Image (cartoon, rainbow, N blue to C red):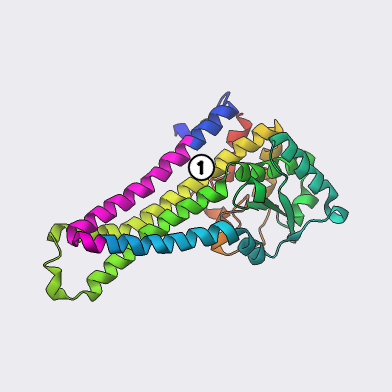
Amino acid sequence: MASKQPLAHLDVQDQISANKRNSFLLMLIVPAVIVLLIYTIGMVYNPGSIFTFLIIGTIFSMIFTIGSYYWSDKIVLATTGARPATKQENAFLINTVEGLAIAAGMPAPRIYVLDSPDINAFATGRDPQHGIIVVTTGIMQRLNRQELEGVVAHEMSHIANFDIRFATLIAVLVGMVSIISQMFLRSLWWGGGDDRDNRGNAIFVVIGIVLAILAPIFTQLIQLAISRQREYLADANGAFLTRYPEGLASALEKIASSKTTIKPSGAVSHLFFSNPIKRLNAESIFSTHPPIEERIRRLRAM
Protein backbone atom coordinates (compact mmCIF):
# COMPACT_ATOMS: atom_id res chain seq x y z
CA MET A 1 0.00 0.00 0.00
CA ALA A 2 1.02 3.61 -0.45
CA SER A 3 1.40 4.13 3.30
CA LYS A 4 4.16 1.52 3.36
CA GLN A 5 6.36 3.28 0.81
CA PRO A 6 9.55 5.06 1.97
CA LEU A 7 9.07 8.64 3.10
CA ALA A 8 11.68 10.28 0.90
CA HIS A 9 13.17 13.59 2.07
CA LEU A 10 10.70 13.93 4.93
CA ASP A 11 11.27 17.20 6.80
CA VAL A 12 11.17 16.90 10.61
CA GLN A 13 9.19 20.10 11.05
CA ASP A 14 6.62 18.85 8.53
CA GLN A 15 6.30 15.61 10.49
CA ILE A 16 5.84 17.52 13.76
CA SER A 17 3.20 19.80 12.23
CA ALA A 18 1.32 16.90 10.65
CA ASN A 19 1.19 14.93 13.89
CA LYS A 20 0.03 17.95 15.90
CA ARG A 21 -2.72 18.59 13.36
CA ASN A 22 -3.83 14.95 13.35
CA SER A 23 -3.93 14.82 17.16
CA PHE A 24 -6.15 17.87 17.49
CA LEU A 25 -8.45 16.73 14.70
CA LEU A 26 -8.88 13.41 16.45
CA MET A 27 -9.56 15.20 19.74
CA LEU A 28 -12.44 17.14 18.17
CA ILE A 29 -14.26 13.92 17.33
CA VAL A 30 -14.79 12.94 20.97
CA PRO A 31 -16.71 16.12 21.96
CA ALA A 32 -18.73 15.69 18.77
CA VAL A 33 -19.76 12.21 19.93
CA ILE A 34 -20.74 13.64 23.34
CA VAL A 35 -22.93 16.30 21.70
CA LEU A 36 -24.59 13.70 19.46
CA LEU A 37 -25.20 11.39 22.42
CA ILE A 38 -26.71 14.16 24.57
CA TYR A 39 -28.85 15.40 21.68
CA THR A 40 -30.26 11.92 21.14
CA ILE A 41 -30.96 11.51 24.85
CA GLY A 42 -32.65 14.91 24.79
CA MET A 43 -35.05 13.59 22.18
CA VAL A 44 -35.93 10.75 24.54
CA TYR A 45 -36.15 12.64 27.85
CA ASN A 46 -37.35 16.12 28.77
CA PRO A 47 -34.79 18.97 28.91
CA GLY A 48 -34.83 19.06 32.71
CA SER A 49 -33.47 15.55 32.91
CA ILE A 50 -30.72 16.43 30.47
CA PHE A 51 -29.45 19.23 32.70
CA THR A 52 -29.36 16.88 35.68
CA PHE A 53 -27.55 14.34 33.54
CA LEU A 54 -24.91 16.88 32.51
CA ILE A 55 -24.40 18.22 36.04
CA ILE A 56 -23.71 14.76 37.47
CA GLY A 57 -21.38 13.86 34.58
CA THR A 58 -19.53 17.17 34.95
CA ILE A 59 -19.01 16.66 38.70
CA PHE A 60 -17.50 13.20 38.12
CA SER A 61 -15.31 14.53 35.32
CA MET A 62 -14.06 17.43 37.45
CA ILE A 63 -13.11 15.09 40.28
CA PHE A 64 -11.26 12.82 37.88
CA THR A 65 -9.53 15.76 36.19
CA ILE A 66 -8.35 17.37 39.42
CA GLY A 67 -7.10 14.07 40.81
CA SER A 68 -5.29 13.19 37.60
CA TYR A 69 -3.81 16.67 37.25
CA TYR A 70 -2.25 16.86 40.70
CA TRP A 71 -1.55 13.28 41.72
CA SER A 72 -1.14 11.19 38.58
CA ASP A 73 2.69 11.36 38.69
CA LYS A 74 2.79 10.12 42.30
CA ILE A 75 0.36 7.32 41.50
CA VAL A 76 2.39 6.23 38.47
CA LEU A 77 5.69 6.23 40.39
CA ALA A 78 4.16 4.22 43.23
CA THR A 79 2.61 1.77 40.77
CA THR A 80 5.85 1.09 38.89
CA GLY A 81 8.19 1.12 41.90
CA ALA A 82 10.65 3.58 40.34
CA ARG A 83 13.29 5.17 42.60
CA PRO A 84 15.08 8.55 42.35
CA ALA A 85 18.31 8.57 40.34
CA THR A 86 21.48 9.55 42.19
CA LYS A 87 24.65 11.19 40.91
CA GLN A 88 26.69 8.42 42.51
CA GLU A 89 24.98 5.71 40.44
CA ASN A 90 23.53 7.57 37.46
CA ALA A 91 25.84 10.51 36.74
CA PHE A 92 25.87 9.96 32.96
CA LEU A 93 22.07 9.72 32.79
CA ILE A 94 21.62 12.87 34.86
CA ASN A 95 24.15 14.78 32.74
CA THR A 96 22.39 13.63 29.56
CA VAL A 97 18.98 14.79 30.79
CA GLU A 98 20.32 18.13 31.99
CA GLY A 99 22.18 18.74 28.72
CA LEU A 100 19.11 18.01 26.60
CA ALA A 101 16.96 20.19 28.87
CA ILE A 102 19.29 23.12 28.23
CA ALA A 103 19.15 22.45 24.48
CA ALA A 104 15.33 22.30 24.63
CA GLY A 105 15.08 25.45 26.76
CA MET A 106 13.04 23.75 29.48
CA PRO A 107 13.53 22.87 33.16
CA ALA A 108 15.41 19.63 33.71
CA PRO A 109 12.91 16.88 34.64
CA ARG A 110 13.35 14.88 37.80
CA ILE A 111 14.90 11.52 37.00
CA TYR A 112 13.88 8.12 38.32
CA VAL A 113 15.21 4.63 37.69
CA LEU A 114 13.18 1.45 37.30
CA ASP A 115 15.06 -1.76 38.08
CA SER A 116 14.44 -3.86 34.97
CA PRO A 117 16.61 -5.38 32.22
CA ASP A 118 14.11 -4.09 29.62
CA ILE A 119 15.00 -1.20 27.33
CA ASN A 120 12.21 1.20 28.20
CA ALA A 121 11.34 4.59 29.67
CA PHE A 122 8.38 6.86 30.27
CA ALA A 123 7.56 10.45 31.21
CA THR A 124 4.94 11.82 33.56
CA GLY A 125 4.07 15.14 35.19
CA ARG A 126 1.45 17.75 34.41
CA ASP A 127 3.78 20.36 32.84
CA PRO A 128 7.50 21.03 32.15
CA GLN A 129 7.93 22.48 35.66
CA HIS A 130 6.79 19.17 37.19
CA GLY A 131 8.22 16.79 34.58
CA ILE A 132 9.56 13.36 35.50
CA ILE A 133 11.48 10.89 33.34
CA VAL A 134 11.81 7.26 34.35
CA VAL A 135 14.31 4.96 32.63
CA THR A 136 15.05 1.30 33.19
CA THR A 137 18.42 0.04 34.28
CA GLY A 138 18.40 -1.94 31.03
CA ILE A 139 18.59 1.30 29.03
CA MET A 140 21.81 2.36 30.73
CA GLN A 141 23.34 -1.07 30.31
CA ARG A 142 22.35 -1.79 26.69
CA LEU A 143 22.20 1.53 24.84
CA ASN A 144 25.10 3.67 23.66
CA ARG A 145 25.24 7.43 24.18
CA GLN A 146 23.40 8.41 20.97
CA GLU A 147 20.66 5.86 21.58
CA LEU A 148 20.20 6.96 25.20
CA GLU A 149 20.00 10.59 24.10
CA GLY A 150 17.37 9.66 21.53
CA VAL A 151 15.14 7.93 24.09
CA VAL A 152 15.55 10.72 26.65
CA ALA A 153 14.81 13.36 23.99
CA HIS A 154 11.65 11.46 23.04
CA GLU A 155 10.43 11.47 26.65
CA MET A 156 11.37 15.12 27.14
CA SER A 157 9.31 15.93 24.05
CA HIS A 158 6.27 14.36 25.72
CA ILE A 159 6.79 16.73 28.64
CA ALA A 160 7.47 19.80 26.49
CA ASN A 161 4.39 19.07 24.35
CA PHE A 162 2.14 18.78 27.44
CA ASP A 163 1.24 15.27 26.29
CA ILE A 164 0.32 14.12 29.81
CA ARG A 165 -2.12 17.00 30.20
CA PHE A 166 -3.45 16.35 26.70
CA ALA A 167 -3.94 12.66 27.48
CA THR A 168 -5.76 13.57 30.71
CA LEU A 169 -8.17 15.82 28.81
CA ILE A 170 -8.94 13.05 26.34
CA ALA A 171 -9.40 10.56 29.18
CA VAL A 172 -11.90 12.91 30.83
CA LEU A 173 -13.89 13.28 27.60
CA VAL A 174 -13.90 9.52 27.04
CA GLY A 175 -14.93 9.05 30.67
CA MET A 176 -17.82 11.47 30.21
CA VAL A 177 -19.05 9.46 27.23
CA SER A 178 -18.94 6.28 29.30
CA ILE A 179 -20.72 7.87 32.28
CA ILE A 180 -23.49 9.39 30.17
CA SER A 181 -23.96 6.15 28.25
CA GLN A 182 -24.16 4.04 31.40
CA MET A 183 -26.62 6.40 33.09
CA PHE A 184 -28.84 6.41 30.04
CA LEU A 185 -28.87 2.61 29.70
CA ARG A 186 -29.48 2.11 33.42
CA SER A 187 -32.30 4.65 33.44
CA LEU A 188 -34.03 2.73 30.65
CA TRP A 189 -33.53 -0.56 32.45
CA TRP A 190 -34.75 0.63 35.85
CA GLY A 191 -37.36 3.12 34.61
CA GLY A 192 -40.04 0.52 34.00
CA GLY A 193 -41.85 -0.40 30.82
CA ASP A 194 -44.94 1.73 31.41
CA ASP A 195 -43.11 5.03 31.07
CA ARG A 196 -40.91 3.95 28.24
CA ASP A 197 -43.45 4.80 25.57
CA ASN A 198 -43.71 8.38 26.90
CA ARG A 199 -40.01 9.15 26.68
CA GLY A 200 -39.95 10.48 23.21
CA ASN A 201 -39.86 9.13 19.75
CA ALA A 202 -39.25 5.38 19.72
CA ILE A 203 -36.73 5.84 16.92
CA PHE A 204 -34.61 8.05 19.16
CA VAL A 205 -34.87 5.51 21.95
CA VAL A 206 -33.35 2.89 19.64
CA ILE A 207 -30.73 5.33 18.36
CA GLY A 208 -29.91 6.31 21.94
CA ILE A 209 -29.40 2.69 22.97
CA VAL A 210 -27.14 2.01 19.98
CA LEU A 211 -25.10 5.16 20.65
CA ALA A 212 -24.82 4.39 24.37
CA ILE A 213 -23.37 0.97 23.54
CA LEU A 214 -21.08 1.98 20.68
CA ALA A 215 -19.97 5.48 21.73
CA PRO A 216 -17.67 4.36 24.59
CA ILE A 217 -15.98 1.84 22.29
CA PHE A 218 -15.62 4.38 19.48
CA THR A 219 -14.22 7.12 21.73
CA GLN A 220 -11.75 4.70 23.28
CA LEU A 221 -10.50 3.88 19.79
CA ILE A 222 -10.09 7.63 19.19
CA GLN A 223 -8.15 7.88 22.45
CA LEU A 224 -5.79 5.11 21.32
CA ALA A 225 -5.38 6.72 17.89
CA ILE A 226 -4.41 10.00 19.58
CA SER A 227 -1.90 8.13 21.73
CA ARG A 228 -0.27 6.68 18.61
CA GLN A 229 -0.13 10.12 16.98
CA ARG A 230 1.55 11.59 20.08
CA GLU A 231 4.20 8.86 19.90
CA TYR A 232 5.00 9.81 16.32
CA LEU A 233 5.12 13.46 17.38
CA ALA A 234 7.51 12.72 20.26
CA ASP A 235 9.73 10.72 17.89
CA ALA A 236 9.89 13.67 15.50
CA ASN A 237 10.47 16.18 18.29
CA GLY A 238 13.13 13.99 19.85
CA ALA A 239 14.96 13.62 16.54
CA PHE A 240 14.78 17.38 16.06
CA LEU A 241 16.20 18.00 19.54
CA THR A 242 19.20 15.67 19.15
CA ARG A 243 19.65 16.42 15.41
CA TYR A 244 20.36 12.70 15.07
CA PRO A 245 17.30 10.55 14.21
CA GLU A 246 19.48 7.45 13.84
CA GLY A 247 20.11 7.33 17.59
CA LEU A 248 16.41 6.92 18.35
CA ALA A 249 15.90 4.55 15.41
CA SER A 250 18.75 2.34 16.60
CA ALA A 251 17.31 2.25 20.14
CA LEU A 252 13.97 1.14 18.72
CA GLU A 253 15.70 -1.63 16.77
CA LYS A 254 17.24 -2.96 19.97
CA ILE A 255 13.84 -2.84 21.67
CA ALA A 256 12.21 -4.71 18.79
CA SER A 257 14.71 -7.56 19.12
CA SER A 258 14.56 -7.80 22.92
CA LYS A 259 12.19 -9.54 25.29
CA THR A 260 10.01 -7.68 27.77
CA THR A 261 9.73 -8.45 31.47
CA ILE A 262 7.94 -5.35 32.75
CA LYS A 263 4.31 -6.08 33.63
CA PRO A 264 2.70 -2.71 34.42
CA SER A 265 -1.02 -2.23 34.78
CA GLY A 266 -2.96 -1.32 31.66
CA ALA A 267 -3.58 2.13 33.17
CA VAL A 268 0.09 3.12 32.83
CA SER A 269 1.32 0.94 29.96
CA HIS A 270 0.58 3.68 27.41
CA LEU A 271 3.16 5.93 29.10
CA PHE A 272 6.12 3.73 28.21
CA PHE A 273 8.47 4.48 25.31
CA SER A 274 7.57 1.04 23.94
CA ASN A 275 4.35 -0.60 25.09
CA PRO A 276 5.45 -3.57 27.25
CA ILE A 277 2.03 -5.23 27.06
CA LYS A 278 0.85 -4.92 23.46
CA ARG A 279 4.09 -4.97 21.53
CA LEU A 280 3.09 -8.15 19.70
CA ASN A 281 -0.21 -6.53 18.67
CA ALA A 282 1.25 -3.22 17.50
CA GLU A 283 -0.70 -3.34 14.24
CA SER A 284 -4.00 -3.49 16.15
CA ILE A 285 -6.31 -0.47 16.39
CA PHE A 286 -6.40 -1.24 20.11
CA SER A 287 -2.67 -0.59 20.52
CA THR A 288 -1.49 2.52 22.40
CA HIS A 289 1.72 2.66 20.33
CA PRO A 290 2.36 2.58 16.59
CA PRO A 291 4.39 -0.33 15.16
CA ILE A 292 8.08 -0.06 15.98
CA GLU A 293 8.99 -0.81 12.36
CA GLU A 294 6.94 2.18 11.18
CA ARG A 295 8.52 4.44 13.78
CA ILE A 296 11.98 3.38 12.63
CA ARG A 297 11.05 3.92 8.97
CA ARG A 298 9.82 7.44 9.64
CA LEU A 299 12.90 8.35 11.65
CA ARG A 300 15.27 7.14 8.96
CA ALA A 301 13.34 9.07 6.34
CA MET A 302 14.05 12.36 8.12
* Residue 227 locus on image (x, y percent): 51, 48
Residue 256 place in picture, x, y as percent: 64, 48
Where residue 234 sits, quadrant-wise, is top right
The outermost residue toward the right is 88
**Closer to us: 147 or 22:** 22
Q: Is residue 294 left or right of residue 258?
A: left
The residue that disc 1 covers is 229
Q: Is residue 268 left or right of residue 90?
A: left
Q: Position of residue 268 (x, y in %)?
A: 58, 59
Tag 1's secondary structure?
helix
| Quadrant position of the N terminus in the picture | top left
Report which quarter residue 238 is drawn in. Answer: top right
The location of residue 255, given as percent across then percent down, is 67, 49
In this rendering, does residue 296 appear at all? no
Give the residue type that dot 1 points to: Gln
Relative to 153, residue 57 above or below: below
Residue 40 is covered by the magenta coloring: yes
Q: Residue at x 49, y 58 (%)?
A: 65
Residue 267 shows in the view: yes
Q: In the image, 21: left or right of 190?
A: right
User: Count the marks: how many?
Assistant: 1
Specify the principal SS of the magenta part. helix
Q: From what the image shows, is residue 194 above or below residue 294? A: below
Q: Nearer the viewer, residue 108 or 267?
A: 108
Residues in magenta? 21-50
Task: Write the residue at 56% across / 54% down.
Answer: 270
Quadrant of the frame with the C terminus: top right
